Amino acid sequence: MLQRQFGSRHIHPRPLLLALLILIGFGAQGKMAYAEDRQQIIVAGGCFWCVEKDFEQVKGVIEAESGYIGGTVANPSYKQVTKGGTGHYEAVRITYDADVITARSLYDMFFRSVDPTDAGGQFCDRGASYRTAIFADGADRKAAEAAKADAQAALGQTIVTPIEPTARFYVAEDYHQDYYKSSKIVLTRFGPLSRANAYKRYRKACGRDARVQELWGSAAPFVN
């Protein structure tokens, strides 16, 4: 048997190997115990910067990505979508841990974070690409329909947000991702600002939170 001698002590490799395997086993069990049940939903709620920012603060949400969905143009650009004619919505794909939060809870939050009575866009952003929608099939569609019915009853007004079949989601350009917290400087009508500060000014000027507060009051999940 091989031995490595340190002074008067002899270290045998077999016990060390056994100890290492035990540690690896505990590590694997730990990873299994904390594995995430990753699921995704896709919602359109006007400006995707705002929807992304709102949902990334929700416990159980792993990631929110801005993108485009629902149209006929492959790999559309932001300019194409906002110009109109592509059929695409500005949308957000939300990845979440289903062991922490449910799709139904996220849909409930979504309806109370937008103006679902507006069929022409959202807040200051007008046009087809800024309309609200949910894209879902199967169990998610049932959850979305239940959330819509509940929101309509709570609001006492007709909700025009459609629930559409899932479709190809195109991730938006890199500069749109996490726009609300980017430190990169951009030129605005207020002068040079970080994207984060430009986003704050845009959101306030667009009246998003004021309108959501007016509609939903204390039930609005993202209005301070």
Image: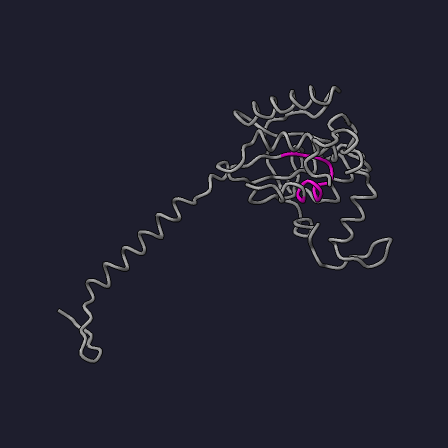
Of residues 166 and 100, the one drawn nearer to the viewer in this rendering: 100
Please state the total of marks drawn on the protein image: 0
User: What kind of colouring is applied to the model shown?
Assistant: one colour
Residue 64 locus on image (x, y percent): 61, 43
Q: Give, as a single range, the part of the protein colored magenta.
A: 43-53
In the displayed structure image, the side of residue 61 where residue 154 appears, left or right = right
Pick the quarter of the image with the N terminus. Answer: bottom left
Most extreme residue toward the right is 189
Residue 52 locus on image (x, y percent): 66, 43
Q: Residue at x 60, y 22 (%)?
A: 146
In the displayed structure image, the side of residue 178 where residue 35 appears, left or right = left
Residue 76 picture quarter: top right
Residue 42 locus on image (x, y percent): 61, 35
Pick the quarter of the image with the C terminus. Answer: top right
In the displayed structure image, the side of residue 213 where residue 43 appears, left or right = left
Q: Is residue 44 located in the magenta-colored stretch of the structure?
A: yes
Most extreme residue toward the left is 1
Of residues 46 and 170, the one drawn nearer to the viewer in this rendering: 46
Q: Is residue 18 located in the magenta-colored stretch of the structure?
A: no
Most extreme residue toward the bottom is 7
Residue 9 locus on image (x, y percent): 19, 75
Q: Residue at x 79, y 57 (%)?
A: 193
Q: Residue at x 32, y 55 (%)?
A: 24
Of residues 97 and 189, the one drawn nearer to the viewer in this rendering: 97
Residue 73 picture quarter: top right
In the displayed structure image, the side of residue 152 where residue 2 appears, left or right = left
Residue 144 picture quarter: top right
Residue 192 vertical position relative to residue 178 in the rendered view, above or below: below
